[in-house]
Image (cartoon, rainbow, N blue to C red):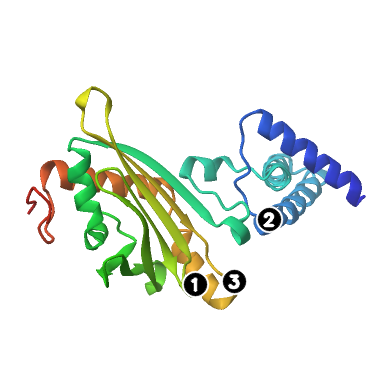
Amino acid sequence: MEAATGATQSGLEREAKQRGKQINVGRNERTASMIGGAALAVTGLTKLAGKKILPGMALMAAGGMFLYRGKTGHCDVFEAMGVDTAGTEDKGLTVEKVLTINRTPQEVYEFWHNFENIPRFMRHLEAVRTTGGRTSHWKARGPAGVSVEWDAEILEDYPGQRISWQSLGNADIPNEGTVEFMEAPGGRGTEVKVHLTYRPPGGTAGKLAAKVAHGINAQVIEEDMKRLKQIMETGETATAAYTGSRTYH
């Protein structure tokens, strides 16, 4: 029975991939979806047997949706939100976004390079404090007053082009990030490409960190990038002034 189930699961995964559907549901969530889907399907059959057609059909449909989610590892809702929990135990959560800002690559680089500016547009960050030439201390907030902290170090620093960093030591949320600044076609400013990866650790502390990390997805980062664009292009911010070649108030 297990072999047959495994074969069916592999076949559905292959079918999903052929349709361009990437696996974006973690192993634990897939297991829960299978169990929940089966329970809903059985309840639906019971309703149908009792001549309760509409409730039975609704439960059967919901059960089928969860079973498919569990077997294929793909969730359309997650895809729309930019969430990927597949293999969270191993690779964590990864988010990538690109946005064009009507400023030169050097200007945007200088603004971002002062990491203390980042909480001005990334709302999940409470504060970033520079602690050395290549090091900084980060504090992020999540739901219900949960907060996590870590130290980070710059790994790559190419002025006007690219910055990469990663967390150090026993970070509450081990993470890494890269931001690239590329001249946009037609002299339209700068294409900013952000790539972030969060890897919540296991245990109780990991569960708290995961609450913060799971609140970070493509939609959230897109909103953050739009705030960055607004700050850089219009200067509409009530926080400290930009320290680069231009001054923002």
Q: In the drawing, does residue 32 fall left or right of residue 118?
A: right
Determine whether the residue tagged by mark 1 lies in a helix, strand or loop: helix
Which residue lies under the disc numbered 1?
A: 208
Eye-nearest disc, 2 or 3? 3
Eye-nearest disc, 1 or 3? 3
From this view, report whether residue 118 is shown above or below residue 80.
below
Name the quadrant containing residue 192: top left
| Tag shown at residue 202 | 3
Looking at the picture, which amino acid does disc 2 mark?
Answer: Arg
Residue at horizontal 73 percent and vertical 34 percent from the top: 14
- Mark 1 and mark 2: span between their CA atoms? 19 Å
User: Between disc 1 and disc 2, whose residue precedes?
Assistant: 2
Spot occupied by residue 175 in the image (x, y as percentages of width and height): 46, 61
Looking at the picture, which amino acid does disc 1 mark?
Answer: Leu
Which residue lies under the disc numbered 2?
A: 27
Name the quadrant containing residue 168: bottom left
Assess whether mark 2 and mark 1 are in contact (beta carbons under 8 angstroms): no
User: Between disc 1 and disc 3, whose residue precedes?
Assistant: 3
Spot occupied by residue 128 in the image (x, y as percentages of width and height): 28, 67
Assess whether mark 3 and mark 2 are in contact (beta carbons under 8 angstroms): no
- Mark 1 and mark 3: span between their CA atoms? 10 Å
From this view, report whether residue 166 is shown above or below residue 163.
below
User: Between disc 2 and disc 3, whose residue precedes?
Assistant: 2
> For the residue carrying disc 3, how many other residues have a C-alpha within 10 Å: few (<14), some (14-19), or many (20+)?
few
Spot occupied by residue 59 in the image (x, y as percentages of width and height): 70, 46
